[in-house]
Amino acid sequence: MKKLEQIYEGKAKKVFATDDPGIVIVDYKDDATAFNGQKKGTIAGKGVVNNKVSNHFFRLLESKGIPTHYIEQLSDRETAVKRVQILPIEVIVRNRAAGSFSKRMGVAEGTALACPILEFSYKNDELGDPFINSYYVRALNLATDEEMEKVKTYSFAINDILSAYLDALGIELIDFKLEFGRSEGKVILADEISPDTCRFWDKATGKKLDKDRFRRDLGDVEEAYHEIIRRLMGE
Ligand code: UDP
């Protein structure tokens, strides 16, 4: 497989075409942004951590029957993935109150929830990713009902798989964001699952091991990202 021209550059990743029209290469950067791009910085080594951590989770999910875009890790920062059409919907799963949920609902961070929450927002930076529900998805033709059923089923299954896996490593999965894509008429998991897109709290100490350390200037940002890779892969 040959890496060809760059076709897209996002906040945390670049995407390159390959000589196979069905495959693209994702290249993870160290750039970090928060609050819809208002806060910018660099986290040394983040691209390597996110690439490896995301691939580790995607392989685990594939082994448990969740279809994903993952094909093969090519280097520390590069991974070959299936080219998909990304659904313009960010899916958030919450197990404990935190972040924007705590703010919006007036519920203190860390409060337990009686059941997991599934939440959708419209993937549009200019609009600040506004909150939507399944009626918006249907009314604006963002995805079919059939596709949304898959999105919901996969999201809860992913939550069960990742929560159990991380629990055994002493990490609580507080919440996370998923993106799905269409590939050959099917819905598959795409984008990434990493400390940029999840809240990971150490079970013993409650220490935040994710991007909140950058968002909130908590310090030890690089260390937290490396702690995640250490627990997952022993590196
Ligand atoms: N998240 C993300 N990208 C976004 C918004 C949220 O990856 O554009 C993740 C975030 O890291 C957290 C979860 O989704 O793990 C829930 O985020 P929340 O809605 O609480 O927003 P935040 O407080 O991050 O603004």
Image: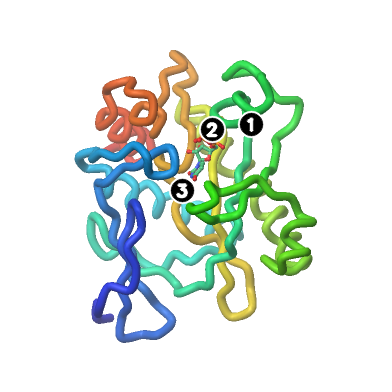
- Of 59 and 42, nearer the camera is 42
Q: Determine which residue is flagged by label 2.
A: 173
Residue 70 horizontal/vertical position (percent)? 44, 64
Give the Cα separation between the discs numbered 2 and 1.
Answer: 7 Å
Q: Identify the residue at horizontal 47%, vertical 30% (top origin).
A: 200
The residue that appears at 68% across and 25% down in the rendered structure is: 105
SS for dot 2: strand
Label 3 is placed on what type of residue? Ile
Q: Quadrant of the C terminus?
A: top left
Looking at the image, is mark 1 or mark 3 earlier in the sequence? 1
Do the residues bearing badges 3 and 2 touch, measured as CB atoms within 8 Å?
A: no
Identified at 32% across, 29% down, the residue is 224
**Which residue corresponds to mark 3?**
193
**Residue underneath mark 1:** 95
Element on which disc 1 rests: strand
Whether label 2 lies within 8 Å of ligand 1 gets the answer no
Nearest to N terminus: mark 3 or mark 2: 2
Q: Residues within 10 Å of mark 3 (few under 14, many from 20)?
A: many
